[in-house]
Amino acid sequence: MGAVTDFPPYLSGLRLAGRRVVVVGAGQVAQRRVPQLIAVGADVHVVAPEATPAIEGLVGSGEVTWHQRPFADDDLDGAWYALALTADGAVNARVIALAEERRIFCVRSDDATRGTAWTPATGRYDDLTVAILGNRDPRRSAAVRDEVVDALREGRIEAPHGRGGAETRLGSVVLVGGGPGEPDLITVAGRKALMGADVVVADRLAPRELLGDLPADVELVDVAKLPRGRSAQQEEINRVIVERALAGKRVARFKGGDNFVFGRGYEEIIACREAGVPVTVIPGLTSPVSVPAIAGIPVTHRGVTHEFSVVSGHLPPGHPESLVDYAGLARMQGTVVLMMAVRNAPAIAAALVEGGRPADTPVAVVCDGTMPTERTVLATLGTLAERLHAESVKPPAIIVIGEVVRIAHPEAFGG
Ligand code: SAH
C-alpha cells in the first residue's frame, strides 16, 4: 500500500444541519468557510483569540458562537467535523492530532495534505450540489465548478428535473434587471437567470444583444409586439408570465435598468403571488444612476450635493394625475434626474426656475446611454427647451440637472 496521499479522496456530502462544527482560527480563510457552514445549517463554533470584522458580524447576528481564546484540547469534544484554519502551523497540527484521536474528520488550511478532509469548490443549481476537488489547486477547482454550474444553467449539460419530472415541476418567475443597455452591464446573477430560463419576456429597452445568446429552444415573448395601450399590455404580461410559470416553466421577466424603477415590476410580483407562483427579483443597474455615470457625470459629489431625486417626467407639471411636487423639488438643492421627460422637459425646466432654481443651473441630457449612438447635450435650465429642439433629442434620454454637471463639464459651464 502506498502513502495515504497517493489515494484520491472519497467525496461525501455531509449533512451538518444542527451538528457541532468547530472552526479553529478566525482569519481570512475562516471568513470564507464559515458562511458556507452557516448556509448548510451547521452549529458553528469558532475558537480564536481574535476574529476578522466579517466573522465578528456573524457572531453579533447570532449565526456563530465565538470562543474568544486560544484553542484548548477539549474544544473538539462533541464535534462532527473540524477545520484547522489558523495561520500557526503548530496550532493546526495540534488540532489535527486531537481530531484524529477522536475520529473527527478535519480540514487543515496551511498544509492540506496533513488534513483528513478537503473542502471542495461547490456550487448549486436547482436542487443539485456540484463539488469539485482539484487536487489542491483551488483556482482550478473553482474554475471547473463555475464551468459546470454555468453549463447547467445555460442548458449545455442536461439536468433532467428530479422529483417527478418536468410535468409536476413548479415553475417560477424571476424579474431580471438588465442594466442600461450595454450587455456587459447586466449582473452576473441576471445573466445566469436569463440563460437558464425556459421563457424570456423582454421589454423594448431590455439589452437586446443578450437575447442573441439565449439557447435556441427558449421561448422569447417580445412585449413590444403585444397589444398597445399601457394597462392592456401590462395585463397581458401578467397573464403570460403567470400562465407559463403554472405550466412548469422558468420565466425570466427581462427589463432595462431595474424592474422596480418605473418598471411596473411590483405589479408583476403581486400577480404572481395571487396566482401562487414563486417569484424572485434580481436588481439591475438603474439608468438614472448608471447612464450619467457612463457619460462621466456623478449624481453626487462631496461638498456639492447631499441628495439626488429621480423623477418621472412623463406628465407635465400641473397635470391632474401628476404625483410630483415640482415646487418642492425646486426648493431642494440637490441633483434632479429626469426620466421619460424629453417631451415635458421644457415645462419642467420652467417650473423649476419659477420655483427658485437659478436659470443658469447646468443640465446634461444623455441620450441612448451606453449605446453606440450615445451622446450628451449640454444646456442650462434657461436654454433646455431650445437645446432639445435644436439637437432633435429623442427618447430614451436621462436629464441631469444640477451643479454635478458643472463638475463634469467645467469647460462648458466654468468650474
Ligand atoms: N426601469 C428602467 C427605467 C424605465 S423608464 C431603469 O431602471 O432604468 C424608461 C426611461 O428610462 C427612459 O424614458 C429614459 O429616461 C430612461 N432610460 C433607460 N435606459 C436608458 C438609456 N440607455 N439611456 C438613456 N435613458 C435611458
Image (tube, rainbow, N blue to C red):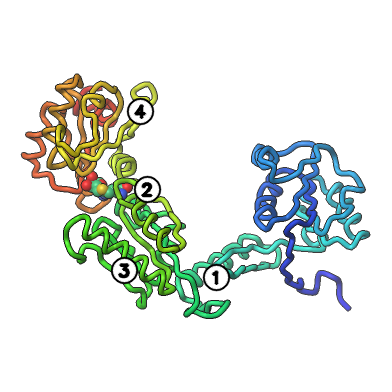
Between marks 2 and 3 in the image, the one whose residue lies nearer the viewer: 2
Marks 1 and 3 close (CB-CB < 8 Å): no
Whether 8 is drawn above or below 75: the answer is below
The residue indicated by pointer 2 is 285
The residue indicated by pointer 4 is 307
Which amino acid, mark 2?
Answer: Leu
Is the residue at mark 2 in contact range of ligand 1, meaning its CB lies under 8 Å from it? yes
Which amino acid, mark 4?
Answer: Glu
**Which sits earlier in the primary sequence, circle 4 or circle 1?**
1
**Which sits earlier in the primary sequence, circle 4 or circle 2?**
2
**Residue placed most toward the observer, 198 or 97:** 198
- Horizontal placement of 413 versus 166: left or right? left
Marks 2 and 1 close (CB-CB < 8 Å): no
Mark 3 to mark 4 CA distance (whole Å): 39 Å
**Which sits earlier in the primary sequence, circle 2 or circle 3?**
3
Category of crowding for the residue at label 3, using alpha-carbon neighbours closer than 10 angstroms: few (below 14), some (14–19), many (at least 20) = few
The residue indicated by pointer 1 is 148
The kind of secondary structure element at disc 1 is: helix
Category of crowding for the residue at label 4, using alpha-carbon neighbours closer than 10 angstroms: few (below 14), some (14–19), many (at least 20) = few
The residue indicated by pointer 3 is 212
Mark 4 to mark 1 CA distance (whole Å): 44 Å
Which amino acid, mark 1?
Answer: Val
Q: Position of residue 43 (x, y in %)?
A: 75, 52
**Which sits earlier in the primary sequence, circle 2 or circle 1?**
1
Whether 84 is drawn above or below 104: the answer is above
Between marks 4 and 1 in the image, the one whose residue lies nearer the viewer: 4
The kind of secondary structure element at disc 2 is: loop
Q: What's the residue at 14%, 36% (across, down)?
A: 319
